[in-house]
Image (cartoon, coloured by chain):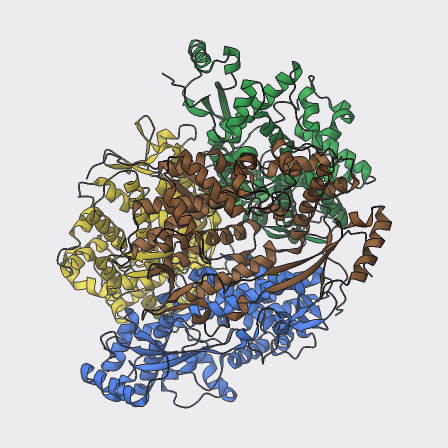
Chain colours: A green, B yellow, C brown, D blue
Amino acid sequence: MSIQPKAKTLKTFNDPIYGFITIEDALIFKIIEHPYFQRLRRITQLGLTNLVYGGANHSRFQHTMGAMNLMKQAIATLRTKGFEITEEEERASKLAILMHDIGHGPFSHALENTIVRGVHHEAISLQIMHDLNAEFDGALSLAIQIYEGTYHVKFLHQLVSSQLDTDRLDYLKRDSFFTGVSEGVISSERIIKMLTIHDGELAVEAKGIYSVEKFLIARRLMYWQVYLHKTVLSAEFLLMNILLRAKELAQSGTEVPAPFALDFFLKQNEMLSLKEHANWLPLFLKLDDVDVMAAIKQWTNHEDHVLRELCNRLLYRRLLKTKELPSPLSVEKQTTYQAQLAEKSGWTVDETRYLFFERSLTNTAYNPESEMIKILFKDGTLRDISEAATIFRFSSLAVQETKNYLYFPENMSLA
Amino acid sequence: MSIQPKAKTLKTFNDPIYGFITIEDALIFKIIEHPYFQRLRRITQLGLTNLVYGGANHSRFQHTMGAMNLMKQAIATLRTKGFEITEEEERASKLAILMHDIGHGPFSHALENTIVRGVHHEAISLQIMHDLNAEFDGALSLAIQIYEGTYHVKFLHQLVSSQLDTDRLDYLKRDSFFTGVSEGVISSERIIKMLTIHDGELAVEAKGIYSVEKFLIARRLMYWQVYLHKTVLSAEFLLMNILLRAKELAQSGTEVPAPFALDFFLKQNEMLSLKEHANWLPLFLKLDDVDVMAAIKQWTNHEDHVLRELCNRLLYRRLLKTKELPSPLSVEKQTTYQAQLAEKSGWTVDETRYLFFERSLTNTAYNPESEMIKILFKDGTLRDISEAATIFRFSSLAVQETKNYLYFPENMSLA
Amino acid sequence: MSIQPKAKTLKTFNDPIYGFITIEDALIFKIIEHPYFQRLRRITQLGLTNLVYGGANHSRFQHTMGAMNLMKQAIATLRTKGFEITEEEERASKLAILMHDIGHGPFSHALENTIVRGVHHEAISLQIMHDLNAEFDGALSLAIQIYEGTYHVKFLHQLVSSQLDTDRLDYLKRDSFFTGVSEGVISSERIIKMLTIHDGELAVEAKGIYSVEKFLIARRLMYWQVYLHKTVLSAEFLLMNILLRAKELAQSGTEVPAPFALDFFLKQNEMLSLKEHANWLPLFLKLDDVDVMAAIKQWTNHEDHVLRELCNRLLYRRLLKTKELPSPLSVEKQTTYQAQLAEKSGWTVDETRYLFFERSLTNTAYNPESEMIKILFKDGTLRDISEAATIFRFSSLAVQETKNYLYFPENMSLA
Amino acid sequence: MSIQPKAKTLKTFNDPIYGFITIEDALIFKIIEHPYFQRLRRITQLGLTNLVYGGANHSRFQHTMGAMNLMKQAIATLRTKGFEITEEEERASKLAILMHDIGHGPFSHALENTIVRGVHHEAISLQIMHDLNAEFDGALSLAIQIYEGTYHVKFLHQLVSSQLDTDRLDYLKRDSFFTGVSEGVISSERIIKMLTIHDGELAVEAKGIYSVEKFLIARRLMYWQVYLHKTVLSAEFLLMNILLRAKELAQSGTEVPAPFALDFFLKQNEMLSLKEHANWLPLFLKLDDVDVMAAIKQWTNHEDHVLRELCNRLLYRRLLKTKELPSPLSVEKQTTYQAQLAEKSGWTVDETRYLFFERSLTNTAYNPESEMIKILFKDGTLRDISEAATIFRFSSLAVQETKNYLYFPENMSLA
């Protein structure tokens, strides 16, 4: 027995969920230290959810580190079960999950639907990975293949992106922890222990079937209780309206002061194109929650009464009220209400759409059209969870659930 | 402001789930101190589950104290919402839930199906309550009315016994804690906060609907993952077979030494009758897990090879193997296997039924025929959870799930 | 029994520590909704600690709500023990603890030591309370008396501010939860259960003595492991240096763009005076973490190489290295190192003090000169914890612990 | 990449603390399955502590499995830091910790001080290890060397037995979990991450110093709040008195019926000798909590009024009262009290010593005379924790704390 250290943990990160997350690989550590990745520290995982669940201030940085930690556990489990995964494959899988969210914008989704249009955050993530790959002389090539699903070992991609990937296994657990919604608690550890491989694809051992069902149920409940919570969405719609109004003003020539990176996107009046990413990606990589909030703070004194009102509402949490509608509002009713609001507020009818609007929220716990979660039985047969769980009428989870909500100011009476 | 204490917490109990459970009422404390209630300290809540989930050694005493604690919370919540509950009603409701399990026998259910036959533990609980009521000069009358459901304030009974009672709210949480099955974690606190009253009956506010669904799902998962776990049941079937064999021997004249209270029930060859409880109840109230385990330890050296083998298996955890059967075994196969086992073991074919048998396990997460969990909507309408949860196909939870298992010794080959 | 609601919970707040925090009082709810209080949502409780403990993004808003929740528990406990506390006293005590941190500036402490000089955050809190009191027609008068300690019921003040107040009981528990440093976990619930009153002052029942000792130890450990963590401080010193440099530039005529409220304080070159708070308090009440971070982001491109370098370091987490020094650096060594750094960086020697400096950190777990934690024994005697804990050499906790650290850039070699 | 399993987890054990404990080694699994080890399932870790902390029903079996799990983590950590530990050493270390408590008797310590006299449980453990080693053809030799400290790799022994061993790291955490005393929570994971080796001996990295201090403090608090809790001890002294009285009666010719293994020890009137272990060890290995409790239940009807009274008290939790004494009782007072009790009870004065007695309880958090916990500093120096923690007056922990208690029946007045 030698007592000379031969290797060294490069770095240990603290995490309230997993205790410690240790990094042994120098390349992984360099990616974590990179400015592009550090930016994720300033993007909250759940956007404005903290206005309803006050503890939910966790960052996308922390989530991504957690997902990588689960990847490590999953790989260790599969190796224990006798499946070979090379050192290089391990590193690349960790890098893939680490970078999977690197293209997210401020407040996670708000900009995507408003001022950064034409490109999806996943496409941006991929573009950034390519840029980083160039910077690191091709060291990320395998990670990119795994991310894209072009590498021949398919289950590695599935650990990064599938209906039971390490991304979901981390975020459900993490969001549940920080919101305090114990209903969403899942046993990531138990599910990972049950993972196996069949014909090169990820599967779950039969005895893990209840945990998988529980995972799907928990996910659905987190959707309605957190992700699609009507008040959380009230805040997010307000944020989107702020950005839409700001853009409208900026493009009609009104001065709308904003931090320089945000300023660029406000003034941009065409769809972004991935082909021309060189024009805008460097600016996008400067954007984070701070820019948006700083602009909103500044706009609380803006000359435009619409922008000003929306910003003051968000900053001081005077959110719009919500009412669930059994069916969409008729055109007549909508017109009546808008007129009423216009008269009360002194705004134009057109302007009232920033304060009074309908939204439909939709959730499907399990998408039967995308790749299925597979259950491996002891006799070697493989079945989709939707069939395997014969007793539990699984089809119920595949049903799209939709709710209609009306959003309106607190001083409005809806007769 | 006076600084003289006017009241005093009588007693504080430690509990790893709720921290502290405080008792302010002298009568409640007397019931807790009573030998009948102290007996529950020596009855495990989950029988032999600790052979699979090693942490599950918690007692029925502790569970009952926990359920009473939730009753206290539920009453406080309802009062905050403006529903009046008198001091007397509060005390009686706590007493009712405290005594609801007082008629349980050793290992919670094992004896009920073997040697204490003809009376259900709930009927025994009620009889004991009446005896205690006599002892306490009628002070438990209201508690008994609430337990039986004859008191005019119906929701108090529902807090003691319904599909969403404080019994279930405690045991799911507690069993999940001690087994470590995090899938079973429920937010009792959240559900209790959502309780309300409608027309004198217990209901849940509409915004609690997801929590109720989660509660039902968690309950179902706990059934399959813990309560009906095939290895847990292997242990419990072994225990039952031990008691059945001991009874068979005792009644055929073989000496089967046992602690005196157990001895009585082994020798009893008729169904017990509640009417004649004076004959057997005092002995029943002496019985606990210790008697059964002590007897089993003693019987590991018994002259009867069947009893001896069964006891040694249980004591040293050589449980029978299990195999899920797609359909019940044919009579032919059963005969063939028994013959094979008889030859191998030198036992008679009749004796082999103690080591080789089939069992069907059945679970229904939600019994649509019993009283429904009611959801109260903001517009004042009341709907059963099975209707309220329209999107989620609730009917799936009402389906009876059945599994067939074969139990057999490890050295047997099932061709 | 009536079933008509007579009261109503006004609002329920979600909290991952306590589950739910309910507000029944309209005035309390109005204070929570007030813009001054909502501002605390944008001030992190632990400043830049999240650069080391990634989960520590919790806000001062959430902490304050938690402290108020503990106040509620403490009052309920004391009432159970027979001490009378009026409804008005309860409300005022809650308001007092709710507002105790309302004068905090961005990043909790950073500005206080740099650009908002001359007034302490506690004095600012008090001033804001008076302003709010005027706004609410004197409804906060009792709360202010309790906060200041002038109300005759002394223990209420002690629950707000003493060595065992609800402020500390919440923040230790909360900071431990979000950092994941389980060593800091304290049982606030247990301590609160042990609270009592003696001669109008707060005391702890003798059996709670170990919990109090544990609380003091946990507090001390949290200091060294979190609050005074050398890397956390490296980030905070960087932030302070940024603000100092920005102020230096602003006052020497260089343009230093910043959000308007921050701009005011950068240009202010005299000590602030409470007497003239009308000049600056309205601007202070607009300031939060967003302003500071937005400025730093903007300054990453500033013409001044010092400011630019510091801001880039903070934004991308290139913190200064630290080295514990057995004793302060000699003037010679300091000069040598500065010269070396100046040569390497091309900065003037004077400028190097922003990147190279010594700091002494000091912590005392228990301040024997401030008001003591009192232990009440069964025989009625009252002793200070430092005497009561005779066996445990309590004096050790009162000792000031000091550590010297050198901060320097990573590329510097300290021979 | 092959996808054929090459290895297999032999068995997974559920544990509420660590989630899963997996066994990959066949020999380790055989030891776990061995009747000697299965016996530990029926020995509670904390004896009668569950009469005060109702959740504390966990078994010594579960603790030992947990300690083995920490051993696995510790070895993995040390390997990550570059210290070589062979497969064989790993297995032997796990076996050593697994068997370290195998010689414990019922209720962990009660018999040791009463009827199994002359041999310490550690000596019994060692003897059993030797017996098992013979049974397993010498496969446990290395494990025994590590347990005894004769193997040249000293740190492996230290992980099994030292002031910072995996035994303590598990039991503090576990006892804290099951009692609900959150003050005792330690971060075993954090401490294990900080372990290192210096000159072949176990040490802790300097940055782990606060965790070690916290561990020592938590241990001390657990002593006073749980292990030496006056009511817990009241129960344990009662149990000891029961066994002493039963032995006294048995040896004076009175019939004292008991399960056969217990019967042997009751009748044994000489000290046991390790040399002659063949005479008594097989019987000892049959003894567990069940035998003792079954005997006590039986003795509640015994003809001897002393034994009967003591057994009824324990079974129905009518424990003796306690009073802390500033100094030992004078002989006069003792005589007076005994006479008073004798008169009241009708017992002889000699018999009253079973109900009325004094005990001194002593605890030392850190034994400065046994092997020290070593702290390894970055500069390579190694210091004992008592010196390393210079600021914290460590000597306080090494002080023996003693408390005197008087135990007496509830109906006695101590003037």
Q: Give the number of marks.
A: 0
* Residue C373 in sight here: yes
* One can see residue A149 in this view: no
In the image, what residue occupies the spot 70% across and 40% down? C246
User: In the rendered view, would you say D191 is above or below D345?
Assistant: above
When the figure is inspected, residue A156 is found, relative to residue D80, above or below; the finding is: above
Position of D42 compared to C335: left or right?
A: left
In percent of the image, x 32 and y 78: which residue is there? D407
- Please name whichever residue, B263 or D293, is drawn nearer the observer in this view of the structure: D293
> Along the line of sight, which residue is nearer the eye, D199 or C337?
C337
The image shows residue A57 at horizontal and vertical percentages of 56, 40
Question: Residue D366, percent across and down?
Answer: 55, 74
Q: Position of residue C391 (x, y in %)?
A: 47, 75
Residues C104 and A358: in front is C104
Left or right position of B227 against B86: right
Q: Is residue B228 above or below residue B215?
A: below
Please give left or right for residue C245 compared with residue B2 in the image.
Answer: right
x, y percent for residue C410: 78, 52
In terms of depth relative to the viewer, which is nearer, C388 or A373? C388
Please give left or right for residue D357 compared with residue C334 in the image: left
The image quadrant of residue C309 is top right
**Residue at the front extreme of this rendering:** C275
Report which quarter residue A411 is drawn in: top left
